[in-house]
Amino acid sequence: MPTLTPESSSAKAPVQADAAGRLAVPAVARAGASLWRDAWRRLLRNRAAVFGAVVIAFLIAICLATPYLAPYSDEEQDFAAQFQPPSAKHLFGTDIKGRDLLTRVMYGGRISLAVGVVATFVSMLIGIAWGSVAGYVGGRTDEVMMRIVDILYSIPFIFFVILLMLYLGRSLVNIFLALGAVQWLTMSRIVRGQILSLKHKEFVEASRALGAGPARVLTSHLIPNLLGPVIVYATLTVPMVMLEEAFLSFLGLGVQAPRTSWGSLAADGAANINPVRIYWWLIVFPGMALAATLFSLNFLGDGLRDALDPQLKDKA
Amino acid sequence: MLTFILRRLLWMIPVLGIIATITFFFVKSVPGGPFDAERRLPPAIERNIRARYKLDDPIAKQYVRYMGNLLRLDLGPSFKYRSRSVNEIIIQAFPVSVTLGVAAMTIALLVGLSAGVVAAVRHNTAIDYAAMAVAMIGVSIPNFVLGPILLILLVFLAGALPVAGWGTPSHVVLPAMALSAPYAAYVARLTRAGMLEVIRKDYIRTAWSKGLDARRVVLGHALKNAILPVISYLGPASAGIVTGSLVVERIFHVPGIGTFFINGALARDYTVVMGTTLLYSSLLVFLNLVVDIAYAYVDPRIELG
């Protein structure tokens, strides 16, 4: 298929050469380049968002390097050192089995962040597919598909996630699927709205006039152009999903031992607290790790929203 | 208005029907029955129990019977608490959860609205910054972290409140605080933003220039319009309080619906799980309707359609 922009062969020759054979894609990417650069500048001006991004980058770096950084090994138990308060030897103290809490929090963060990212990705895939088909096909199909979304909206999903976990078994993959499977509704609405506003634009008409089928128009023209709001909403979905994972793990329905997450660490902490043994570090440190992450992700998400798609502010 | 309410009430019926259906087939397809939890029962006894709960009927027949009973508001017998029906459990536990939820919502609104108004009136002062900093922290601390921390601070260290359980008004305070904190914080932020937007409007200047006192201007004129975002947030907030109570009831050993739902789910007590899920769903669908009506009532520009 020929490319759609007139200056495609002259101005940005290197881009063209890189993506030879997929001519429509560089056209879209280049049209978006100034939008992305603009958004980037706006984002950098937002101090709260930059702060959030730095914290998140720091946490991700720590989580990736955990096997090298962690002061102890994940499963190292020392029953002689049960419930030690924070000290130079154990910065965050130790738990019921004498495991180093700092190490546990680091390993737990890997799981918590992984759940946040992967479940959000699952919800993005479902939401984009559902919303773009509904918006693009339109008519009766759209009506039926969005009515289904309306009905699903009024169902309290946390109950079904709990049932889903019981049904599927409490494995990590199932947490990804169960949380992703209930988070796509808003995403599909956003995507549908974007598709509706894009599908009669000239560049889409042009592509259709040149003989592109619906699948082609969707994948190479519409979806790349609605990524902005999708990225924004996805960034705001990650903390929601992480909170839900923590919630499930807290109830004992999420991440299972020997694996751990911030939610299950908090649950262990809560279970071991009583008036005689005030082991505050067991709840405070995992709780702080989780709160700091949610806090930063929300800042970053709000900043991205203002930078990429100011109109979304009223919708979400 | 009336037709709107009627239409929405009618819309609840298919929604709840779908929820009941999904829950039914979901719970039925969960592997493992309610009776193989403890030691293996002698086959004869197990046969008798299965017969008593009519578990050997074809699934379609069970479904029709369940839906029929549902229409008569009969949720069936509990599997785990053998001598009690789900209705009895709900009648006993529901008031507990409602008390907790209403207390939490009241705290969230009282604290959130007053903090928001004060922060807006004292815009850009230390009070404003302090209130918003606390609100920011409140929004990001999950209630299952806040709960145990409050427990340590207020109960173990200060000794001000009873540890856990239910029965006296002082038992409500701690769980309600843990449950309401994120919502109080968010309401405070919404109120402050709404007030700041409204407070510079012409009609507020008019109110001041009429010589009204500050209380009338702020609470009577400004707050009335600034409160709209708070009201539309009540829907998600009540949903959050309802689901949050699952965890908070567990932390503080409150014998509410959430406790029965979680224990039911863990013990594969089909009927309790289905009954409590349906109760929660109807509650949420109903609360959303109430919020929509309240919204239209406060803002006459909204048309109910």
Image (cartoon, helix red, strand yellow):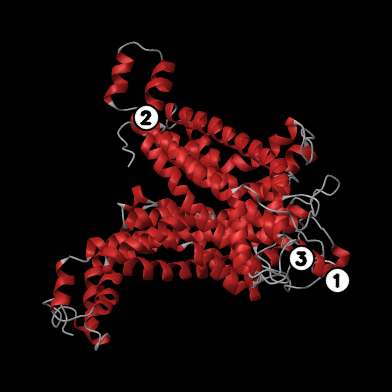
Secondary structure at numbered mark 3: helix
Q: Is B92 on the left or on the right of A176, as rendered?
A: right
Q: Is A133 on the left or on the right of A235, as rendered?
A: left
Measured as percent of width and height from the top left, residue B57 is found at 67, 68
Secondary structure at numbered mark 1: helix
Q: Which mark is residue A115?
A: none
Contact between labelled residues 1 and 2, with CB atoms less than 8 Å apart:
no
- Who's the residue at 71% across and 43% down the image? B93
Tell me the chain of label 1.
Answer: B
Secondary structure at numbered mark 2: helix
Q: Is A82 on the left or on the right of B118, as rendered?
A: right
Q: Which residue is mark 1?
A: B44
For marks 2 and 1, give the CA distance: 68 Å
Which image quarter holds the N terminus of chain B? top left
Q: Is A66 on the left or on the right of B46, as rendered?
A: left
Tell me the chain of label 2.
Answer: B
Q: Is residue A240 above or below residue B112?
A: below
Seen from the viewer's position, the closer of residues B168 and A14 is B168
Measured as percent of width and height from the top left, residue B225 is found at 37, 29
For marks 3 and 1, give the CA distance: 11 Å
Q: Which residue is mark 3?
A: B51
Report which quarter residue A293 is drawn in. bottom right
Tell me, yes or no, if residue B66 can be seen here.
yes
Mark with earlier residue (2, 1): 1
For marks 2 and 3, give the CA distance: 61 Å
Decide: few, some or many residues near mark 1? Use Cα within 10 Å; few <14, some 14-19, many ≥20: few
Give the amino acid type for the residue marked by disc 1 in the picture: Ala
